[in-house]
Amino acid sequence: MTGYPPVPSVDEVERHFSRAVRDSRREEQPYRHWLLKQVLPIDICTGILTLPIAPAVLGQTDGTRGTYNDQRTFITPLLRTQFPTCAALADALQRPSVARLLAETLEIEVEGGYLRVEYIQDLDGAWLEPHRDVPEKMFSMVIYLFTGPHAKDWGTDIYDADVKWVGRSSGEFNSASIFVAGPATWHGLELRPIIGVRRLMEINYVRPSWRERGQLAFPDRPVNLRC
C-alpha cells in the first residue's frame, strides 16, 4: 500500500453511490425528500475524514454559512489534484450516468449544471437559522459523516411550511437526504452542544448562473447526460 486510506476506483464510487440512490426511500412530509443509506464506499468516508484540513474556528456566527465563505472547504480543482479521495468522489459525481440517475430520481433537469461539493466541519456554537436553499441549487444533498456518542443528536432540523419545528434527521453515519428547493423546504441546525466535530458533505448541482465559481469542482465543465 502506497498510502492510507486506499482510494476506491471511480467506477466503484459510482456503483456504490448509484445503488444508494436507486434504493432510496421517498418521503412526502413535511416536503418531498429522499433518504439514503450507505451512500459512499467506506474508504471514501475515511479519506474525507482524514483530510489534513482543520475545522475553522468561527466563534459566534449569524446563523448562515455565507458570512464566512472564505473559511469554507469545497472540492475544487486544487483539492482534486492534491487528494485522490477528492478526485475519485468528484469524478464519480460528474459522470453522465450519475447525472441521469439523479435527474430521473428527483424528476429535475440537470443538464448544464455544475458540481459543487462542500466539506463541512461544525464545532460547538455552530447553528443555522431555518432557511430554504436558493433556487440556483438544482438539488441539495447532505451526507452525514459524524461519529461519537453525541452524534445521534446532530442531524438536520426540519420545519413545516409555517416554519414550525417538526423533527430532525437521524444523522446516521454515511446516510443522506436529498431534496429539491421549494417554497416549503425549511431546514436548519438548532443551537445545541457539539462535543467533537460535526462533519458532513453537501452536494449540489448548481445552475450556470452560480456566481461563486471558486466553489465548483469543475468550473469549466458543466454536467451533461451523454456518455
Image: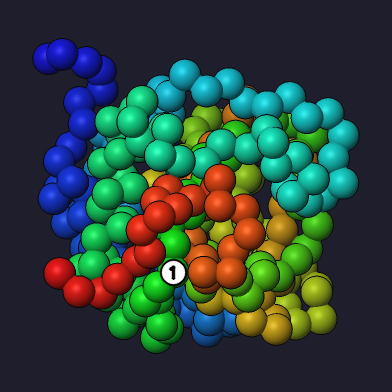
Position of 127 relative to 220 (above/below) = above
Q: Residue 85, located in which quarter of the rendered image? A: top left
- Please identify the quadrant where the C terminus is shown: bottom left
Name the residue at 57% across, 59% down: 169
Q: Is 199 in front, or is 148? A: 199
- Image spot of residue 189 (x, y percent): 72, 52
Name the residue at 73% across, 78% down: 160
- Image spot of residue 218 (x, y percent): 39, 51
Name the residue at 25% across, 52% down: 92
Position of 151 relative to 36 (above/below) = above
Identify residue type, mark 1: Gly
Name the residue at 41% across, 82% down: 109
- Image spot of residue 206 (x, y percent): 51, 66
Side of 176 relative to 24 (left or right): right
Q: Secondary structure at mark 1?
A: loop
Position of 154 relative to 107 (above/below) = above
Disc 1 target residue: 113
